[in-house]
Image (spheres, helix red, strand yellow):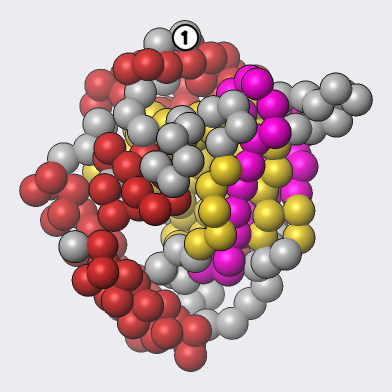
Amino acid sequence: MALSYDLAVDGVRALYDRRISGPPVLDLDRDFAPGHGFVNAWRAIRDEAMQIRRRIDEVPRFHEIMPEQASISANDGRDWRMFILKAYGIEQPRNMAACPQLAALVREIPEVLSASFSFLGPRKHIPPHRGPIRGILRFYMMLLMPRADDGSPAAVLKVDDVEYRLDEGQFLLWDDTFEHEAWNDSDDVRTVLSLDVWRPHMPIDMQFLSGLLIRLVQLGIRIRGVD
């Protein structure tokens, strides 16, 4: 299963690489202007995430949701948990109800295909990897950043060999088909809002391919389910 998934992903990525070029980090105003709504509401969103974090043992690990990702989620025995409100257009009603302010924003903005809280556990390392679909961008907003002994941010997102140590309320819009990794050098949990958003300004054929891939993923979600 993992081998066939990897081969399919490599083939899809090669198609995108030939048709869409761009930088690893993008401009919010140009490429996802509605993202400012999430930035403006970051404290309210953080409060909802903290409510979920109080029962973090009930939140599934990423590889429990998507076994194909075990190589990056279960690689070191440490926690990376995902609380998913919406996955590729499919809402999770119970999780949406648990976060009404975030859910309202997600429902107002059709470009948002997926929305989740990402809880990166103490000392967890997500090894280098690449996402498959360049038709989707990743919006990543820091909600709770653990601190190193000197007070600096203790968790890192590395995209295309550049390290980003975002403080709370800061964000990054980036293309996850570039190689990236993350780690948490603390004894606390790093908490992030993660959105997958439709990429604007794509050629028509790539819009069609992206829509087709999203529908295939939706089919898989409906068959398998997601918590």
Farthest residue, direction front: 76
- For disc 1, the neighbor class at 10 Å (few under 14, some 14 to 19, many from 20) is few
Which residue is found at the position 53% from the left and 14% from the top?
Answer: 50
| Rendering coords of residue 127 (x, y %) | 54, 53
From the viewer's perspective, tell me whether residue 192 is left or right of residue 69: right
The image quadrant of residue 63 is top left
| Rendering coords of residue 194 (x, y %) | 51, 41
Between 55 and 107, which is closer to the camera in this rendering?
55
| Rendering coords of residue 197 (x, y %) | 47, 54
Position of 154 relative to 206 (above/below): above
Q: Which residues are magenta?
A: 164-191
Q: Which residue is mark 1?
A: 54
From the viewer's perspective, tell me whether residue 90 is left or right of residue 16: left
The image quadrant of residue 198 is bottom left
| Rendering coords of residue 201 (x, y %) | 53, 75
Label total for image: 1
Position of 183 relative to 163 (above/below): above
44 in the magenta segment = no
Which residue type does callout 1 highlight?
Answer: Arg
Which residue is found at the position 59% from the left and 54% from the top?
Answer: 181
Which residue is found at the position 29% from the left and 76% from the top?
Answer: 7
Quadrant including the C terminus: top left
Farthest residue, direction bottom: 18
